[in-house]
Amino acid sequence: MSDAARGVAAMVLACTVWGLSALLYKAIDHVPPPEVLAHRTLWSLVFFLVVLMIQGRLRHLPRLLVSKAVWLVVLAALLVSANWFGYIWSVQNGRVIEASLGYYIFPLVAVLIGWVIYREGLAPLQWMAVALATLAVLVLTVGLGAGPWIALYLAATFGLYGLLKRRIEAGPVVSVAGEVTVLAPIAALWLWGVHSGHWGSGGGFGRNWADSLLLAVSGVATGGPLMLFSYAMKRVRMATVGLVQYLNPTLQFAVAATIFAEPVTLWHMIAFPMIWAALGLYSFSVLRQERKRRAIPVAG
């Protein structure tokens, strides 16, 4: 198997784990979302510390936390925590279809953020994709009588998170390890309050072996795909990454509709094909731009 093929396999596996993660959080939907989030944070930290120790890069973590970029790390930590919480809440409250919409439209939200913040130009097809996705959101808003706020929340928090990540000069594992390190004291304090009875009626961890195992696995389910994603990013073209990442929300949608039996209304059947068409236009535009860049001869 070639290096590129291994990269694609890693990307597919990462997106598969992300896409099926709703099954994990549904299995512990009797544990309140803030508690699940706290465990996800702490067990992710354990996972990343072990990985960095094995890689011999543990020394990079304290360097990041005392660097000038620490405030970017803090802001990124708050945004990724908000995104994680929103996804956990959506799973536990039967809103996975709406969550999948958020991850479908995330690339288009990221394009808009790049246009607003960095003044990055958009090709005509990309503008068409953004317009079509906006129309799809309006269709859902009018048809369902309420905006897809969970989808917009997840897309916005993840888009802004990606914006900050571009400015943090550290590898993906080190930077995310820094983020969960910043969040760890808050997570530990929350779990102390839950288990001591100061808020809540006792924590889920230790109640039975199944809940305890699933809460711990949430850390691996967070860190493992990121490792695979990082591996793929070094071996696969960005256009390929962009196409394969749609596997994540597609699996989310499939799980929600077939396993969780969430209702798929007429308005969903109108809006989602519009989103898929928008992503098709966007992906085609990106692929065409990449081909043009590769066709330009390098000087010298």
Image: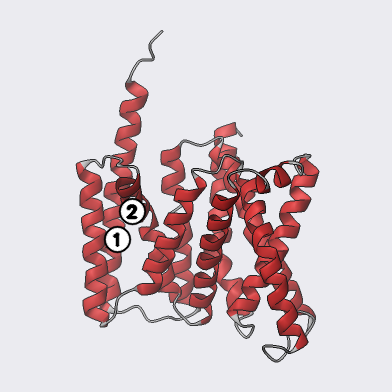
- Residue toward you, 234 or 4: 234
Question: Residue at point 39% right, 57% down?
Answer: 106
Q: Which of marks 2 and 1 is nearer the N terminus?
A: 2
- Residue toward you, 282 or 81: 81
Q: Name the residue under label 1.
A: 275
Q: In which quarter of the image is residue 225?
A: bottom right
Q: Which residue lies furthest to the top in this view?
A: 300
Left of 271 or right of it: where is 8? right
Quote the CA–CA distance across marks 2 and 1.
10 Å
Judged from the image, the secondary structure of the residue bearing numbered disc 1 is helix
Residue 238: x %, y % from top left: 44, 39
Left of 200 or right of it: where is 285? left
Judged from the image, the secondary structure of the residue bearing numbered disc 2 is helix
Question: Residue at point 36% right, 73% down?
Answer: 149
Q: Nearer the viewer, mark 2 or mark 1?
A: 2
Left of 251 or right of it: where is 41? right
Residues at discs 2 and 1 in contact (Cβ within 8 Å):
no
Q: Mark 2 points at which residue?
A: 108
